[in-house]
Image: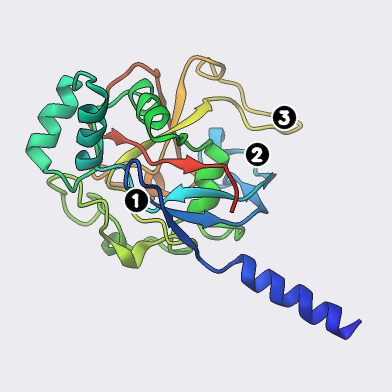
């Protein structure tokens, strides 16, 4: 019995070890998020983040960073797809190592199709950002720290930072810039969370897609929490919104 308990502890530790794999087509470094159950949402925040509820997820891979302008440019060259005008303008302004912005959710899905990857669900995104500890409202822990992300809380930010920046603000699995820098498209509809008395809103339904993570222009830590939700039409090309990728193929 003692040996079985030791084996169970060993397997639990192994499952939490960070693992990386490079997806050759788009160059994303993918991090393994082990299967688990976590409390999604925040009872102390806006009503669309309530009620907090348990979600169980299978393991998946997620991009360590947001898709960069250099990666998106490679996609355009490989497919012959026309460059979205706003993306082109922002890529010239910020440079190849910054997140690809000015893209609609549909633009992001086209990239994912080419790269043989997917957009994360809301639940996958939040789990990769905060793990299974309900108190962790930010990727790095409980308390906001402006120096661990790109935002305008302490001072106005001129624009997004490189996608491989703010290592001190990494999430429990090693993801970078999941707070601030760029808002990120998910593949989830903006809907009420399940519960006995779910909130009501005219925006809920299958009209808007959810974005997560906040962006560099936000001046309030509340909007930079891992539980915070924003939404827009899937066809909207927003100057502050990019994306990261996932793979659900297993290890």
Q: Quadrant of residue 41?
A: top right
Identify the element where label 2 is drawn: loop
Q: Position of residue 220 (x, y in %)?
A: 32, 47
Residue occupying the point 28% across, 26% down: 103
Q: Which residue is mark 3?
A: 197
Please provide percent x and percent y for residue 241.
30, 33
Image quarter (top left, top right, bottom left or bottom right) of the C terminus:
bottom right
Q: Find disc 1 in the rendering and name its residue.
A: 65
Comparing 113 with 52, the one in front is: 113
Cβ–Cβ below 8 Å for labels 2 and 3? yes
User: 209 left or right of 100?
Assistant: right
Badge 1 element: loop
Disc 3 from disc 1: Cα separation: 36 Å
Q: Residues within 10 Å of mark 2 (few under 14, many from 20)?
A: many
Q: Earlier in the sequence, mark 3 or mark 1?
A: 1
Horizontal arrangement in the rendering, residue 174 relative to residue 27 (left or right): right
Residue 94 against residue 238 in the figure, above or below: below
Q: Nearer the viewer, residue 244 or 126?
A: 244
Residue 100: x, y in percent?
A: 24, 37
Colour logic? rainbow
Q: Residue furthest right?
A: 1
At a point 72% along the width and 33% down the height, the residue shown is 195
Tell me the tag on residue 51.
Answer: 2
Q: Nearer the viewer, residue 212 or 34?
A: 34
At x 63%, y 65%, the residue is 15
């Amino acid at each position: 019995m003692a040996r079985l308990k030791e084996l169970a502890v060993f397997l639990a530790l192994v499952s939490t070890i960070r693992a990386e794999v490079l997806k050759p087509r788009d160059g994303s470094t993918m991090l393994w998020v082990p299967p688990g159950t976590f409390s999604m949402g925040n009872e102390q925040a806006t009503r669309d983040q309530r009620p907090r509820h348990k979600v169980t997820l299978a393991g998946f891979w997620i991009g360590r960073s947001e898709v960069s302008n250099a990666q998106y440019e490679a996609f355009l060259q490989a497919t012959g797809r026309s460059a979205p005008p706003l993306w082109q303008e922002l890529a010239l302004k910020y440079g190849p190592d910054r997140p690809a912005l000015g893209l609609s959710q549909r633009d992001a899905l086209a990239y994912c199709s080419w790269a043989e990857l997917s957009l994360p669900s809301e639940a996958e995104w939040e789990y990769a950002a905060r793990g299974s500890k309900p108190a962790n409202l930010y990727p790095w822990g409980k308390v906001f720290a402006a120096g661990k992300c790109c935002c305008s809380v302490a001072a106005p930010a001129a624009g997004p930072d490189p996608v491989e920046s703010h290592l001190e603000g990494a999430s429990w699995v090693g993801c970078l810039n999941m707070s601030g820098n760029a808002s990120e498209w998910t593949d989830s509809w903006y809907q009420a969370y399940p519960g006995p008395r779910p909130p009501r809103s005219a925006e809920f339904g299958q009209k808007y897609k959810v974005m997560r993570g906040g962006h560099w222009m936000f001046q309030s830590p509340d909007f930079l929490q891992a539980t915070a939700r924003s939404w827009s039409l899937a066809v909207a090309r927003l100057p502050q919104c990019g994306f990261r990728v996932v793979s659900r193929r297993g290890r």
